Image (spheres, helix red, strand yellow):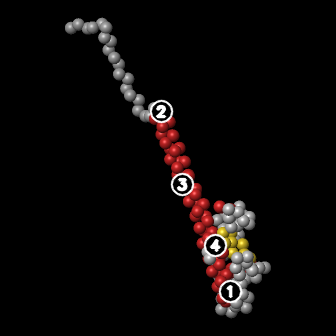
Amino acid sequence: MTINSQTQPTLKMPKANGFSFIELMVAVVIMGLLTSVVVLNVLPSQNRAMVEKARSDVALISQAVEMYRMETLRYPAMEDGLDALTRAPAGDTFRQEGFVKSLPKDPWNNPYQYLVPGEFGPYDVFSLGADGRLGGSGLDADIGNWLDE
């Protein structure tokens, strides 16, 4: 047997388990892209949901105002505001409770507004929007019962 002195035995290094740095960086970039896509699609949906909740609350409060008017033949006084809906009208012997259990706050945690007489009808029920001030556009726009007509 002859051994060739020019060929050296090659040692095979065992392959390390796990990911290389490049593979980890590619995974991080992909996760970042997916996160940005989700955020860009979810945030507008959340804003739309807040506006829809405000519209729904305004419709519910407006129905309670109309029920109050049907029983008392007048709208709640401006001094009483929407709080008049949470208790039985004075002198009403049939109704033991108000027209709503409690008044919700708008999605931006502000109280709903009430004007009688209203600018757009006999009364206005509205949310001041995300900015909490009259007027505005987009998310800051007022959301009121006059928008349903």
Q: Nearer the viewer, residue 89 or 118?
A: 118
**Closer mark to the observer between disc 4 and disc 2:** 4
Mark 3 highlights which residue? Answer: 41
Query: Residue at left 43%, top 34%?
Result: 18
Q: Label 3 vs label 1: CA separation?
A: 43 Å
Could you give the CA–CA distance between mark 3 and mark 2, rounded to whole angstroms?
Answer: 29 Å
Nearer the observer, disc 4 or disc 1? Answer: 4
Comes first in the chain, label 2 or label 1: 2
Q: Residue at x 64, y 81 (%)?
A: 64
| Residue beneath disc 4 | 147
Circle 3/circle 1 CB separation < 8 Å: no
Mark toward the start of the polypeptide (4 vs 2): 2
Residue 22's label in the rendered image is 2
Mark 4, Cα crowd under 10 Å, few <14 / some 14-19 / many 20+, is few
* Residue 61 x, y percent position in the rendering: 65, 77
The three-letter code of the residue at mark 2 reads Ile
Residue where numbered disc 1 is placed:
69
First along the sequence among labels 4 and 1:
1
**Dot 4 and dot 2 residues touching (CB under 8 Å):** no
Question: What's the CA distance linking mark 2 and mark 1?
Answer: 71 Å
Viewer-closest of 132 and 91 = 132
Residue at x 60% of width, y 68% of height: 53
- In the drawing, does residue 9 fall left or right of residue 54? left
Query: Residue 146, how many percent across, how many down?
Result: 66, 75
* Residue 51 falls left or right of residue 80: left
From the top left corner, tell me how far across and down residue 52 is, in percent: 59, 67
Q: Residue at x 65, y 61 (%)?
A: 138
Q: Amino acid at mark 1?
A: Arg
